[in-house]
Amino acid sequence: MTGAVLYCIIAAVSSVLAIKVCGRKDPAASFKDKILMAGIFFTLWIPASLRIYTGNDYRTYISHFHDAYCGNFVVTEPGFNQIVKAIYTLFDGEYFLILFSLFSAVTVIFFLKGLYEQSEDFGMSFMLFMMFGLYFQTYNTVRYYMALSVVFFAMRYVIKKQFGKFLIAVLFAALFHKTALITLVMYPACRLKWGKVHYILLGILGISGLIFGNHYMELFIRLYPSYLNDPEHLVSDGISLVNIARSAATLAAAFILLKKSDEEDDAYGFYFRMNAASLVLYACFSFVPSLSRIGYYLNISQVLLIPAILHRPRRKFFEGKERKLRMAVTACAILYFMFFLHKAQGNTVKILPYSTWLSYPLTELRAFKG
């Protein structure tokens, strides 16, 4: 079985289970939901735990584990380092597969919990989560995606204005990837009610990025001087047309379908403004290295915003056409997933081919190999 076929099976099986989840709208079905959610968890966690050398930085992480365990200088965050030391000490050896499995489990749990607690349509949100490749990208940069999953789960605290809980969650996430700290500014800003002036200011900020990119880069280097030691990290990924298109299409859908695109509803407005900020970020600040490490904190809201759009009062022309709209969204998402799989062998993703440690000798799995 090829890796692409396996990924399609994982996406299909888990999405079918997700469709059957009733979600918060039916508390009486909570036991059934728990069984289904457990099935989804194992469908996602088992392939992630069985993989070996799958992901663009898998071998790099083995080296990070080794350096953290031995007390060598390492660029990773203290929470990550302490977990590595604890696991390797507990098992008396550098069993890196256990660490990959542990980080995968925690990441999947927080993503599933966040989707279940926050989505108006869990089945649709989960399908988008899979079709956008978010789950499969957790095979890369495991620290970052674990932090992203925690912050995603904590978005509900921003909506409810429980900023103390949000702060604690973000600080916890930052123990594994410090980029999480930027959400302490971005999320409260998106939680505010925006008027025309705020959108104009956002546009001016975007224009400034296009004009004064060099000055922004100087500021970036001052904040992250370690990047000077590795010039490769200073090379941007270029303009991400895919992320621009996703953000633009989502905003366009809101304006076209809905009677009012930015309603008073706290959750919907929050997701909408995050998506607007995401569009400006990707369109005007493409010179920033590893931009998606910032952008994903914003555009991950699309898995919640798109189902929310489908549940809002629509313009008269679109009334009674929910089924057709859902089918159109699903078709577009599947096409996106096919595109994602097409580029999954590239150096920036590299989750294909899929390899499992089940076919490796035991000696390959028990010791560090630099």
Image: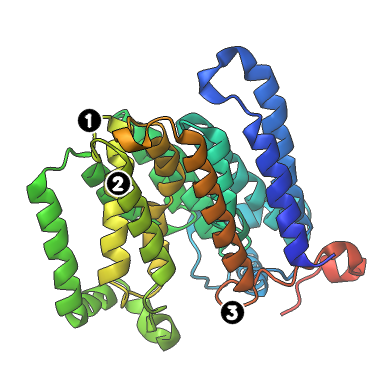
Q: Secondary structure at mark 1?
A: loop
Q: Residues within 10 Å of mark 1 (few under 14, many from 20)?
A: few
- Viewer-closest of 310 and 77: 310
Few, some or many C-alpha atoms within 10 Å of disc 3 (few <14, some 14-19, many ≥20)?
few
Residue 107 screen position, x and y as percent? 58, 47
Image vertical order of residue 190 relative to residue 321, above or below:
below
- Which residue shows up at 33% across the image and 42% down it? 257
Q: CA distance from mark 1 to mark 2?
A: 18 Å
> Taking 155 as reference, is 217 left or right?
left
For residue 314, side relative to residue 37 (left or right): left
The circle on residue 264 is 1
Residue 76 appears at what percent x and percent y?
Answer: 50, 65
Residue that badge 3 annotates: 347
Q: Can residue 57 be seen by looking at this rendering?
A: no
Vertical order, 25 against 236 (above or below): above
**Which mark is nearer the camera, 1 or 2?**
2
Mark 3 or 2, closer to the camera: 2
Give whichever of discs 3 and 2 has the lower sequence position: 2
Residue 95 in the image: state x and y as whole percent. 77, 60
Q: Quadrant of residue 218?
A: bottom left
Which image quarter: residue 282?
Answer: bottom left
Q: Nearer the viewer, residue 257 or 86?
A: 257
Q: Earlier in the sequence, mark 3 or mark 1?
A: 1
| Amino acid marked by disc 2 | Ile
Q: What amino acid type is highlighted by mark number 3?
A: Asn
The vertical placement of 64 against 316, above or below, is below
Task: List the residue tagged with mark 2.
Answer: 256
Which residue appears at 73% of the width and 62% of the height? 96
Image point 63% across, 28% down: which residue? 21
